[in-house]
Image (cartoon, helix red, strand yellow):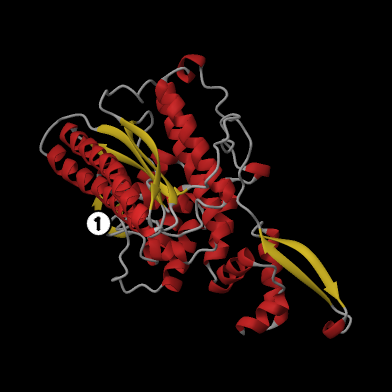
C-alpha cells in the first residue's frame, strides 16, 4: 500500500478492492511477491532465486498479473552481463494486501475470525523461533506485555487509536532507518513487532494448558487451498453477503434470493453449495411441505472459526518454558484463544491484530521501543481515567486486552500482516 493503512480518500470502492484482493489471494506466491516487493525491488528471476515458487515463466506470469491489477509497478530495467542480451525488469509493490478498519468491517464474522486465528498462529511461530534461537531476550530493552483492561466506550476508542497509531509509527521508523542505513555501513536489525487490542469475555481464565493452532492447517487444508477459498469469497459481494447473513441466522437459498433480490434461486443455491463445500457454510436442517409444493428447502449457517485444542508448542525445550518471557507468551496466547472461542475477539470490527517484521538501525530500534513503552503506559493511564468515568456514569464496563511486543527476530523479514 501507499501507506501503512489504506485511506478511504482513495478512489477505490470496497467491491473493487475486494476484487483486487482476490487476485493476490488466488495463489500464496502472489501474496509473497507483493509482501517482499513492498520492502525492496526484485525481478521475477531474482524472486525465484530467493524464494522458488515454480518455473521462471510461472513466476513471470504472476508478476505480470499483479502488474496488470495495480499490485506491482516497474521501477527499472537492466541489460548486459549474465543476462546475455536479455532485459531484466525490476518491480516494486506500492502497497500491501492488508485491511483497513472499514474494509475489515465488511467481511463476514466467520471470515474475520478464521483469518484472525491464522494470523495469531503466524505470530506465535515468530515468537517460538526467536525463543529457540535465543534472540527473543537478546536485547534487554525488548518489550513484551499483555494487559487486561476495564474500560468505558471512550477509553476503548482511545486505546485503539493509540495502538493503530503505533502501527503506523513502525513503518515511519523503518523508512527513516532505511534512509540512514543508505549512508552508513551498519548492520541492520531484524525485528518483529506485534500488536493486539480486542474485546475479552468476562470469565475466569482457563489455566488448563496452552491451546494454540497446529503448525499445519487443520484437516489437510494447505495454504494453497486456503488462499483459493479466500480468493473465491472475495470475488463476489454476493458470497460475502451470504456468509454475513448466515453468521446471524439460519438462511436458505430461496429465502436469501427473495429477501435481497439477489438473483435466480438456482444460481443462489449454487453459491450456497459452493460455500458449503469450501467450508464457509454448513447445512443445519431441511424443511418440506406448505408453500414449498413438494420441494425441500435447505437452511445453512456460517461455520465457526477453527480453534483447536492442540498443544503444538509442547516441543519447546524445558529451559525455554521456564523463562518468564515464555510464561508471559503462554498467558497472552490463552487470553487471545479464549476471546476467539467466546466470539468477542472479532465481535466488533474496530479491533487491532498485527505482526510486522521490521528492518531497523540502532536509532530506529530505540525509537520503536520508546513508542511502544509510551503506548503501554498510556493504556494504564486510560484505564484509570475510565474507572473514574464509569463510577460517575453507570455505563456498562468493557473488558479489553492489549498486547504489545517488539523483539529481535530469529528469521529474516517476511510478511507484515494487518487485519
Q: Is residue 399 above or below residue 250?
A: above
Residue lying furthest top in this view?
319
Residue lying furthest front in this view?
392
Residue lying furthest left in this view?
183
Label 1: which residue? 75
Closer to the camera, 355 or 210? 210
Q: Residue at coordinates 30% horizontally, 41% vertically from top-left?
A: 380
Q: Position of residue 159 (x, y in %)?
A: 32, 51
Residues packed near mark 1 inside 10 Å, few (<14), some (14 to 19) or many (20 plus): few
Q: Is residue 191 above or below residue 240?
A: above
How many numbered marks appear?
1
Q: Position of residue 94 (x, y in %)?
A: 29, 58
Q: Position of residue 209 (x, y in %)?
A: 58, 29
Closer to the camera, 385 or 377? 385
Is there any visible trace of residue 54 in the rendered image?
Answer: no
Q: Residue at coordinates 39% horizontally, 37% vertically from top-left?
A: 146
Amino acid at each position: 500500500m501507499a501507506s501503512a493503512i489504506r485511506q478511504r480518500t482513495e478512489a477505490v470502492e470496497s467491491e473493487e478492492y475486494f476484487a483486487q484482493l482476490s487476485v493476490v489471494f488466488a495463489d500464496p506466491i502472489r501474496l509473497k511477491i507483493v509482501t517482499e516487493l513492498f520492502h525492496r525491488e526484485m525481478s521475477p528471476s531474482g524472486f525465484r532465486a530467493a524464494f522458488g515458487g515454480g518455473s521462471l515463466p510461472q513466476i513471470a506470469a504472476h508478476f505480470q498479473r499483479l502488474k496488470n491489477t495495480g499490485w506491482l509497478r516497474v521501477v527499472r530495467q537492466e541489460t548486459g552481463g549474465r543476462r546475455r542480451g536479455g532485459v531484466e525488469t525490476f518491480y516494486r509493490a506500492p502497497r500491501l494486501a492488508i485491511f483497513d478498519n472499514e474494509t475489515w468491517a465488511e467481511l463476514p464474522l466467520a471470515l474475520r475470525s478464521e483469518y484472525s486465528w491464522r494470523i495469531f498462529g503466524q505470530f506465535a511461530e515468530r515468537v517460538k523461533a526467536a525463543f529457540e534461537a535465543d534472540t527473543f531476550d537478546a536485547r534487554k530493552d525488548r518489550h513484551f506485555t499483555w494487559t487486561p483492561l476495564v474500560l468505558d466506550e471512550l477509553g476503548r476508542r482511545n486505546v485503539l487509536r493509540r495502538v493503530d497509531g503505533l502501527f503506523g509509527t513502525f513503518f515511519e521508523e523503518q523508512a527513516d532507518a532505511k534512509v540512514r542505513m543508505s549512508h552508513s555501513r551498519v548492520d541492520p536489525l531484524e525485528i518483529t513487532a506485534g500488536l493486539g487490542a480486542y474485546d475479552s469475555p468476562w470469565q475466569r481464565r482457563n489455566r488448563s494448558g496452552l491451546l494454540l493452532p497446529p503448525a499445519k492447517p487443520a484437516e489437510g487444508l494447505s495454504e494453497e487451498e486456503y488462499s483459493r477459498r479466500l480468493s473465491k469469497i472475495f470475488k463476489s459481494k454476493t458470497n460475502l453477503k451470504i456468509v454475513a447473513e448466515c453468521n446471524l441466522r439460519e438462511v436458505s437459498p430461496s429465502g436469501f434470493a427473495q429477501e435481497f433480490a439477489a438473483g435466480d434461486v438456482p444460481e443462489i443455491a449454487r453459491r450456497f453449495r459452493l460455500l458449503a463445500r469450501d467450508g464457509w457454510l454448513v447445512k443445519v436442517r431441511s424443511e418440506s411441505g406448505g408453500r414449498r409444493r413438494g420441494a425441500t428447502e435447505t437452511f445453512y449457517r456460517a461455520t465457526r472459526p477453527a480453534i483447536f485444542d492442540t498443544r503444538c508448542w509442547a516441543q519447546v525445550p524445558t529451559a525455554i518454558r521456564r523463562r518468564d518471557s515464555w510464561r508471559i507468551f503462554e498467558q497472552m496466547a490463552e487470553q487471545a484463544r479464549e476471546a476467539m472461542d467466546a466470539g468477542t475477539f472479532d465481535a466488533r470490527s474496530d479491533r487491532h491484530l498485527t505482526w510486522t517484521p521490521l528492518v531497523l538501525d540502532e536509532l530506529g530500534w530505540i525509537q520503536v521501543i520508546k513508542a511502544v513503552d509510551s503506548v503501554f503506559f498510556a493504556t494504564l493511564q486510560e484505564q484509570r481515567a475510565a474507572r473514574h468515568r464509569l463510577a460517575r456514569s453507570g455505563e456498562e464496563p468493557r473488558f479489553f486486552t492489549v498486547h504489545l511486543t517488539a523483539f529481535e527476530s530469529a528469521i529474516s523479514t517476511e510478511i507484515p500482516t494487518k487485519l
